Image: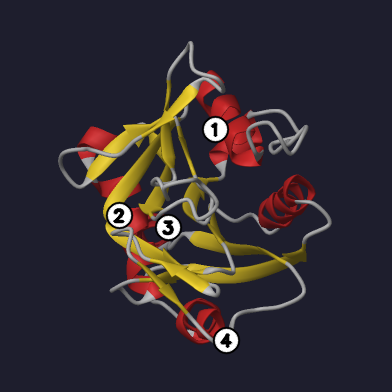
């Protein structure tokens, strides 16, 4: 009996799958293309390699919404949080394929064994020149960061990235103090800069996996390669 119990416990460990919180801060309207191409597949397609739980939080402010979503993720004992914004779509992958790529990048690539945050690649829609939503710390600059425009390979370590498509190991939130997200003024760095600085201070690395690419939606659709199209709704 004891041998059977030990074997059964081992089998349970083998069969254990991660629990991922799909966390979505949103405003009062959703783009129909986003619902069809991003939300619906993530929300309604079951996967055999993970358990997904979806959490929504209407935005009183982005830092408050993100903190609220993380609290919900932790309350449900999720292993990971996947932030996805309501104005991005994946350029080639199904959203669930992209999610698995980010997960495998975090857990299967030995060079990234310290990576606890992995983002897809997309342009920062509100930035002049549409730079990629990833930055390196650069003391002496106005806000202390410079955008990354060139890299080699399919992943790179960054100081800060956007949170529009970002998988985060929940160990970070269990080991760092609240608030996790903070945005003091509209003129200063946004809540993502605050979070990534906090994570780095506690020894957690951030990477961007450039094979997962996204476009921004809206009247002005910005693709990852920098091209733009105007959409009529």
Tell me if mark 4 has few (under 14), some (14-19) or many (20+) residues whose alpha carbon lies within 10 angstroms of its own: few
The residue identified by callout 4 is 32
Q: Residue at x 47, y 82 (%)?
A: 41
Q: Earlier in the sequence, mark 1 or mark 3?
A: 3
The residue identified by callout 1 is 196
Q: Earlier in the sequence, mark 2 or mark 4?
A: 4
What percent of the width, then of the height, locates residue 38? 48, 77
SS state under label 3: helix
For discs 1 and 3, the disc positioned in front in the rendered view: 1
Determine the CA span between mark 1 and mark 4: 31 Å
Q: Earlier in the sequence, mark 2 or mark 3?
A: 3
For discs 2 and 3, the disc positioned in front in the rendered view: 2
Side of 78 relative to 225 (left or right): right
Q: Earlier in the sequence, mark 1 or mark 4?
A: 4
The residue identified by callout 2 is 104
Q: Quadrant of the N terminus?
A: bottom left
For discs 2 and 4, the disc positioned in front in the rendered view: 4
Above or below, 185 relative to 105: above
Above or below, 113 relative to 130: above
Determine the CA span between mark 4 and mark 3: 45 Å
Which of these two is toward me, 145 or 75? 145
For discs 4 and 3, the disc positioned in front in the rendered view: 4
The residue identified by callout 3 is 9
Determine the CA span between mark 2 and mark 4: 29 Å
Q: Residue at x 74, y 68 (%)?
A: 27
């Amino acid at each position: 009996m004891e041998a059977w119990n030990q074997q059964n416990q081992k089998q349970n460990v083998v069969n254990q799958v991660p629990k991922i919180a799909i966390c979505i801060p949103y405003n009062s309207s959703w783009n129909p293309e986003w619902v069809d191409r991003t939300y619906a597949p993530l929300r309604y397609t079951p996967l055999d390699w993970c358990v997904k739980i979806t959490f929504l939080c209407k935005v009183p402010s982005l830092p408050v919404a993100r903190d609220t979503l993380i609290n919900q993720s932790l309350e449900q004992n999720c292993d990971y949080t996947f932030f996805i914004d309501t104005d991005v779509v994946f350029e080639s992958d199904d959203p669930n394929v992209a999610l698995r790529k980010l997960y495998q990048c975090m857990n299967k690539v030995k060079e990234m064994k310290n990576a606890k945050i992995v983002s897809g690649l997309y342009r920062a829609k509100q930035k002049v020149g549409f730079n990629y939503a990833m930055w390196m710390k650069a003391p002496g600059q106005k806000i202390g960061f410079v955008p990354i425009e060139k890299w080699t390979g399919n992943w790179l370590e960054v100081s800060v990235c956007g949170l529009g498509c970002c998988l985060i190991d929940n160990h970070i939130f269990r080991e760092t103090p609240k608030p996790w997200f903070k945005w003091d003024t509209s003129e200063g760095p946004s809540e993502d800069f605050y979070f990534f600085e906090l994570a780095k201070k506690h020894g957690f690395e951030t990477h961007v996996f450039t094979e997962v690419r996204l476009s921004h939606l809206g009247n002005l659709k910005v693709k990852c390669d920098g091209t733009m199209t105007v959409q009529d709704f």
